[in-house]
Image: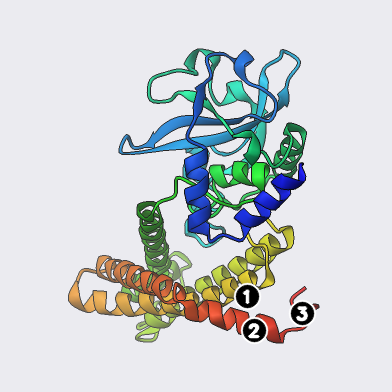
Amino acid sequence: MARASVEFWNSIERLPTDKQKHLLQRQLQTREPIHSFKDIRLGDHLVRKNSFLGLVSYEHHFICVGFNGEGKPLIVHYYSTPWKATAQLIPSITGCGSPFEQLAVVQEMCIEEYVSEAALQTEGNEVARVVWPEELLRYPPEERVKKARGRAGKKEKWYDLEKNNCETLIMWCFCDLQISLQVTTAVRYLREVIGSGYNSLRQSLQQVPKVVVEQFGDDIILAVMRLMRAKPIEAALPKGIGVYVGAAVSIFAEAFLAYREIMSAKQKWKEGIVMTTRQEFIKEVIDSVLSAPLRAGGSIGGMTFGQFLIPIPVLGGIIGAAIGAFACDYTSKWLTGFDFTEFLAQCIDSHLSPDKLD
């Protein structure tokens, strides 16, 4: 890379993120249509038009990293089939994983597994090459390929609609900037609403054991005793035990989720991809610690009030838990969005010795 290019990129890296985006958006407008696989070159930045439910248009980004024995391009991208993405929500709802981070995986594949040659210019799904001006090319094609294959080799599962998506992966390969030019304020808002909605659903399902114990616990125990031909007893469960069961399930689930979030954040920091500084990791820990009790408290409180306001067995508690969890999850995102948590992370980082948290 020429010296002028080094100085140029050093100046770009010092700019705020919004100015970086504005500069690159202005420079990366040109597209060259891809009509056949032969049009694709090593290290090409490729995009394919797409839409979400036919309502929100976006571009899917990928990079050519080589060619197979038949001369067909090999690509790397953040990708998953709709079926796999949907299936990932099942373990996620139980608290065994993040619903969004594992919706896609960085992987290498033949381009035919993603789009056929005949469909390269299908209306609404056209494939094109992003034209990078020479002065913006920070790395040669071979270096871009090495960076992309390095991420694919780890089967990275840290997908984030705003911070680590298909576009940020390719931008990082080209210029080391973890940035997505097509992420707007509306996209961020949609991400927050979907995330809060998912968490409220997860919290609601976590209240099912509590509601079942409270409403049907005695009947279940008596039925089991009859099957075992044991002598039935009255009032098998202490009154109010369901409340404690529901609270315990919520607290345990949120504590486990917070632990997983912190461990995942530490790994991201160590890899230096999504998080590049220790201060970012500390802020993520602070955010997780603040959010977990708020979400648990919201679901427990909502479940309790829901049963009073909606006197329908099971349904009232679940609806209340969903509303309470949604409200408190959204509140936690609002609180952690303030500069205070960033300031607190900066203070903690400055007072910890370099070997701490390693």
310 left or right, relative to 56: left
Between 76 and 354, which is closer to the camera in this rendering? 354
Q: What residue type is labelled 2?
A: Ile
Lower sequence index among marks 2 and 1: 1
Q: Which residue lies furthest to the front in this view?
A: 4
Q: On residue 234, which mark appears?
A: none
Above/below status of 67 relative to 212: above
For the question of whether residue 222 can be seen, the reply is no
Above/below status of 139 relative to 274: above
Alpha carbons under labels 3 and 2: distance apart? 11 Å
Are the residues flagged by discs 2 and 1 in contact, CB closer than 8 Å? yes
Lower sequence index among marks 3 and 1: 1
Residue lying at 63% horizontally and 29% vertically, measured from the top left: 44
The tally of labels here is: 3
Circle 1: is it few (<14), some (14-19), or many (20+) Cα within 10 Å? many
Alpha carbons under labels 3 and 1: distance apart? 11 Å
Badge 2 element = helix
Q: Which amino acid does label 1 sit on?
A: Ile
Q: Quadrant of the N terminus?
A: top right
Above/below status of 87 relative to 268: above
Q: On residue 282, which mark appears?
A: 1
Badge 1 element = helix
Circle 3: is it few (<14), some (14-19), or many (20+) Cα within 10 Å? few
User: How far across and down, in percent of the image, does residue 55 sit?
Assistant: 30, 38
Residue lying at 68% horizontally and 26% vertically, measured from the top left: 74
Circle 2 residue:
348
Q: In which quarter of the image is the C terminus?
A: bottom right
Circle 3 residue:
356
Q: What residue type is labelled 3?
A: Lys
**Quarter-wise, where is residue 225 in the image?**
bottom left
Residue lying at 42% horizontally and 38% vertically, measured from the top left: 58
Alpha carbons under labels 2 and 1: distance apart? 8 Å
